[in-house]
Image (tube, rainbow, N blue to C red):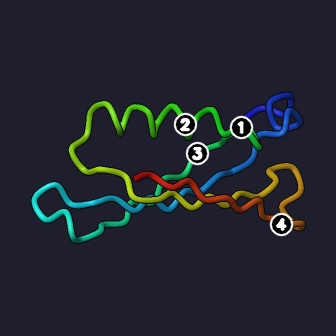
């Protein structure tokens, strides 16, 4: 990732995605997603979640997001939020 993108508030973002198993909806499965994304809007993650809801069978339960700055590896800060799907 180039420096110009890094200073535009893109951060390494990890999302813990919980979803219902299609054949056993009372059970939850976890999927970890990691990508560079811009905070606080998270356009890359939102695009992925939109794709998930349109194309995959497992209904989303919740998404927990954490990220850290890219430019200063010695300094880690978290931005944590949670999306709920019902």
Instruction: Give the mark nearer the N terminus: 2 vs 4.
Output: 2
- What residue sits right under mark 4 in the picture? 76
Label number found at residue 46: 2
Q: How far apart are marks 2 and 1 (CA)?
A: 8 Å
* Disc number for residue 54: none
**Residue at the location (57% across, 61% down)?**
64
What numbered label is drawn on residue 35? 3
Res 27 → quadrant: bottom left
Could you say whether the residue bearing mark 1 is in a helix, strand or loop? loop
Measured in 3D between alpha carbons, the distance from the residue under mark 1 to the one under mark 4, in whole angstroms, is 19 Å
Label 4, label 3: how far apart the Cα atoms are: 16 Å
Q: How many marks?
A: 4
Q: Do the residues labelled 1 and 4 touch (CB within 8 Å)?
A: no
Q: Do the residues labelled 2 and 1 touch (CB within 8 Å)?
A: yes
- Counting residues from the start of the chain, the first of labels 2 and 1 encountered is 1
Tell me, for residue 41, which label it has, or none. Answer: 1
Q: In this view, does 28 lie to the left or right of 77?
A: left
Under circle 4, the secondary element is loop
In primary-sequence order, the first of circles 3 and 2 is 3
Seen at 58% across and 34% down, the residue is 44
Where does the N terminus fall, quadrant-wise?
Answer: top right
């Amino acid at each position: 990732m180039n420096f110009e993108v890094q200073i535009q508030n893109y951060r390494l973002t990890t999302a813990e995605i919980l979803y219902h198993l299609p054949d056993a909806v009372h059970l939850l499965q976890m999927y970890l997603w990691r990508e560079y994304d811009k905070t606080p809007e998270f356009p890359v993650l939102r695009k992925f979640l939109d794709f998930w809801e349109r194309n995959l069978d497992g209904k989303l339960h919740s998404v927990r997001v954490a990220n850290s700055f890219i430019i200063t590896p010695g300094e880690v800060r978290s931005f944590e939020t949670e999306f709920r799907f019902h």
